Image: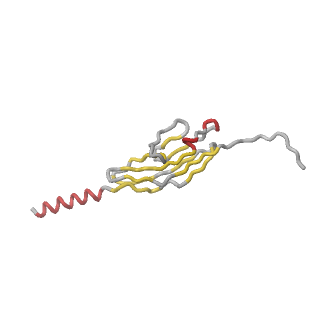
Amino acid sequence: MIFFLSFLYLKKIDHIVDHIGPYFIREPPQQVIFSNNTGAVIYCSVNGNPMPKVYWETKNDQIITDVTGIRHVRHDNALIFQQFSTKDYRPDLHSQTYRCCAENSVGIIKSRYVQVRAGKCVSVEISDFILF
């Protein structure tokens, strides 16, 4: 009887050890600055057991959704900002604070905030100039 109870106890401990809360392998940087000509990729790699579900949220704790042609979360959990024309600049997306979050049955983690700033690249054509 004691052997059977010990076996059950060890099995319970083994089950607990198998579960690991989420942890970052690659946490996003504090700041990402890019131009509309380049776009940006912000990586967030996590691990845990069971494998955590990853999502991105704003500083106001709003979970982000994909915005076609502007921002989306890639299959590897990276936050992607695509190239955009100056007329498509959106301060609510391109000048925003985000963070990566990961959650499984053991717990939840949230990365440091990432300040994202996209600049508009403007080309200027000079047709006439005078040399002194």
Whether residue 1 sits left or right of residue 41 in the image: it is left
Quadrant where the N terminus sits is bottom left
Residue 105: x percent and y percent? Answer: 32, 50
Extreme residue in the left direction = 1
What residue sits 50% from the left and 41% below the top? 72
What residue sits 72% from the left and 41% below the top? 123
What residue sits 35% from the left and 50% below the top? 104
Whether residue 58 sits left or right of residue 1 in the image: it is right
- Indicate the colouring scheme: secondary structure
Q: Measured along the vertical axis of the image, is residue 76 above or below residue 13?
A: above
Question: In terms of image quadrants, where is residue 91?
Answer: top right
Residue 58: x percent and y percent? Answer: 48, 46
Residue 19: x percent and y percent? Answer: 31, 55
Residue 2: x percent and y percent? Answer: 11, 64
What residue sits 43% from the left and 50% below the top? 101
Numbered disc total: 0
Whether residue 131 sits left or right of residue 102 in the image: it is right
Question: In terms of image quadrants, where is residue 3?
Answer: bottom left
Q: Measured along the vertical axis of the image, is residue 124 above or below residue 31?
A: above
Question: In terms of image quadrants, where is residue 127?
Answer: top right
Extreme residue in the front direction = 60
Whether residue 118 sits left or right of residue 22 in the image: it is right
